[in-house]
Image (cartoon, helix red, strand yellow):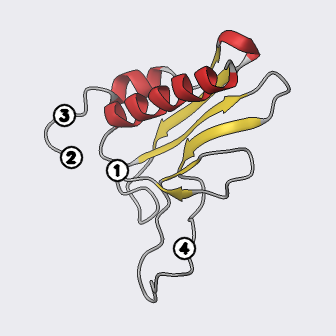
Amino acid sequence: MNGPDVGLETLLELDGSVLEQEGGFWIKIEARQVPASEHALHGIRYSLTLHDRFGTRVLGYDNAHAVKPPKKFKFAGQRLPYDHRHRTASDKGVPYAFESAQRLLEDFFAEVDRVIKEAQQ
């Protein structure tokens, strides 16, 4: 991360927010600063989720747990990524390259727009 993260204040201010979206979708945001650790090198614990009208999570970005890399790759001895995203309701997560809180917000809301648009077609 180069320079101050201009999106960090925005992300932290959104903590606890539930944002209604079109088509009955809604967003829940949780974000707080924590001491930097191997699980949160950037010092932020976050969960940004999009839910459908039935309350099912259909998209999520978080760092609550490590994700296992695909079996076709050998990652013996390497640190498992905690920053990840869930692309569907059943997705167990794929690594997400956290760059900054600003980029996290941009990536998440771009995916939200895509998911909602696809659902309305």
Marks 2, 4: nearer the viewer:
4
Quarter of the image with the C terminus in it: top right
Which residue position is annotated with label 1? 42
Instruction: Give me the C-alpha separation between circle 3 and circle 1.
Output: 12 Å
Q: Are marks 1 and 4 in contact (CB under 8 Å)?
A: no
Instruction: Give me the C-alpha separation between circle 2 and circle 3.
Output: 8 Å
Instruction: Give me the C-alpha separation between circle 2 and circle 4.
Output: 27 Å
Crowd band around label 1 with a 10 angstrom C-alpha radius: few (<14), some (14–19), many (20+): some
Which residue position is annotated with label 2? 1
- What's the residue type where badge 4 is placed? Pro
Crowd band around label 3 with a 10 angstrom C-alpha radius: few (<14), some (14–19), many (20+): few
Instruction: Give me the C-alpha separation between circle 4 and circle 3.
Output: 33 Å
Crowd band around label 4 with a 10 angstrom C-alpha radius: few (<14), some (14–19), many (20+): few
Which residue position is annotated with label 4? 70
Instruction: Point out residue 31 in the picture as x, y percentages from the top left corner.
Output: 52, 35
- What's the residue type where badge 2 is placed? Met
Which circle's residue, 3 or 1, is located before the other in the chain? 3
Which residue position is annotated with label 3? 4
- What's the residue type where badge 1 is placed? His
- Please say if 17 is above or below 80: above
